[in-house]
């Protein structure tokens, strides 16, 4: 009879692991980080999450397992902040509109024609303003913003061609806006008849004609294939939009300092990648849409700017903006 010492030794190790129970398995298991977003595959703020994942997992081998859920399959659009606050979700890309539901000061970033362009956006959030506004999110919502990603400049996208020069030309247009009050208000300020709908239902609504149009940045119009079911893009450029890559405070507390540093770096790298690709695409997509047969028109942007800015300044939202903040934002060159 031969004795298999190797098997015996392994058996003893396995028995020790089982006896060690939870402590052993907790050390062995990487920490799962679940990210939820309504973004569609291929859109740059979806792609940047894979870069984030790769950076984190390579820098912290065996420690972290990032799991990305696109198309709002894990949490519905707009429900992510509450899910992170409850500790049910680790990370998401949240909007200023989401944040302003809990921190009214943040509605300044939901207002049309405040941020001028992507470079202005970058400088605003890299300044003291960004630090102060991020601190508010940490203090009041318990969420940590890791990076700011340029979502793009929002343009109108209509199902049927229409002569749109000024906001008055949008009267009666059933314009889909995302489902929260600040988004609906933007649609109203543009002169349209806003209606709420989740992002992932927009394609079908355009196809079937339950809405007359929607607004999104050009790269999203391309990646979500809205050009297949619309005829026109009106270059209003009404909102230079951002999404904020955020992590639940509950998850953040579980990370050690080294891991936190890696998460911060990874988020910056990911946002940089998104911003470069998006800005490049925005410059060339008008040609793409023309090739797809869409009519691209330039409205009287000054008329839109004037109406939208007045609309916000006279609104309840502006009353919540911190004293002097609009001037500070405008002063950043
Ligand atoms: C949208 O619903 O139109 C919007 O662009 C709003 C953004 O804040 C963001 O949620 C985005 O959708 C999704 O990430 C899908 O691109």
Image: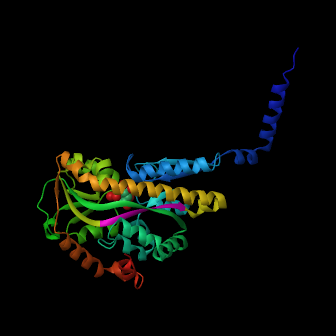
Q: Is the magenta stretch mostly helix, strand or loop?
A: strand
Q: Pick the residue in front: 13 or 241.
A: 241
Residue 97 horizontal/vertical position (percent) = 38, 67
Q: In terms of image quadrants, where is residue 309?
A: bottom left
At x 50%, y 73%, the residue is: 131
Q: Pick the residue in front: 85 or 303.
A: 303
Q: In which quarter of the image is ligand 1?
A: bottom left
Q: Does the magenta stretch include residue 242?
A: yes
Residue 103 horizontal/vertical position (percent) = 45, 74
If the image is split into quadrants, where does the N terminus sit? top right
Residue 188 horizontal/vertical position (percent) = 24, 70
At x 28%, y 49%, the residue is: 203
Q: Say above or below: 27 vs 137.
A: above
In this image, 332 relative to 22: left or right? left
At x 25%, y 61%, the residue is: 155
At x 34%, y 71%, the residue is: 115
Q: Say above or below: 108 vs 26.
A: below
In the image as oriented, which residue stretches furthest toward the bottom? 323
The span shown in magenta is 239-247
Q: Is residue 11 magenta?
A: no
Q: Say above or below: 10 vs 332.
A: above
In this image, 95 relative to 252: left or right? left
Residue 82 horizontal/vertical position (percent) = 49, 63
Total marks placed: 0
Q: Can residue 183 be seen in this view?
A: yes
In this image, 172 relative to 59: left or right? left
In this image, 256 relative to 15: left or right? left
If the image is split into quadrants, where does the C terminus sit? bottom left
Q: Pick the residue in front: 32 or 112.
A: 112
In the image as oriented, which residue stretches furthest toward the top? 1
Q: In terms of image quadrants, where is residue 292?
A: top left
Q: Can residue 178 be seen in this view?
A: no
């Amino acid at each position: 009879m031969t004795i298999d010492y190797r098997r015996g030794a392994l058996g003893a190790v396995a028995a020790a692991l089982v006896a060690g129970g939870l402590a052993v398995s907790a050390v062995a298991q990487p920490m799962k980080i679940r990210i939820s977003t309504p973004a569609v595959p291929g859109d740059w703020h979806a792609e940047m999450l894979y870069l984030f994942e790769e950076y984190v997992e390579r820098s912290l081998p065996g420690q972290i397992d990032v799991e990305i859920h696109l198309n709002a399959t894990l949490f519905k659009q707009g429900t992510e902040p509450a899910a992170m606050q409850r500790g049910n979700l680790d990370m998401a890309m949240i909007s200023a509109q989401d944040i302003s539901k809990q921190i009214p000061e943040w509605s300044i970033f939901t207002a049309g024609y405040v941020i001028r362009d992507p470079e202005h956006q970058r400088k605003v959030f890299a300044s003291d303003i960004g630090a102060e506004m991020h601190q508010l999110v940490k203090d009041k919502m318990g969420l940590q913003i890791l990076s700011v990603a340029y979502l793009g400049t929002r343009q109108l996208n209509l199902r049927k061609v229409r002569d749109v020069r000024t906001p008055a030309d949008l009267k009666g247009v059933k314009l889909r806006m995302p489902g929260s009050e600040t988004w609906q208000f933007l649609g109203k300020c543009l002169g349209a008849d806003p209606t709420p709908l989740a992002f992932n239902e927009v394609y079908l609504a355009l196809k079937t004609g339950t809405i007359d149009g929607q607004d999104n940045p050009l790269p999203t119009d391309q990646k979500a294939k809205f050009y297949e079911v619309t005829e026109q893009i009106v270059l209003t450029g009404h909102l230079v939009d951002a999404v904020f890559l955020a992590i639940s405070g509950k998850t953040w507390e579980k990370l050690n300092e080294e891991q936190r540093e890696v998460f911060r770096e990874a988020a910056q790298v990911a946002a940089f990648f998104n911003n470069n690709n998006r800005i490049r695409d925005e410059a060339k997509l008008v040609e793409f849409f023309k090739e797809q047969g869409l009519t691209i028109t330039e409205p009287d942007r000054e008329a839109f700017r004037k109406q939208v800015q007045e609309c916000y300044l006279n609104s309840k939202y502006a009353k919540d903006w911190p004293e002097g903040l609009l001037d500070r934002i405008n002063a950043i060159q």
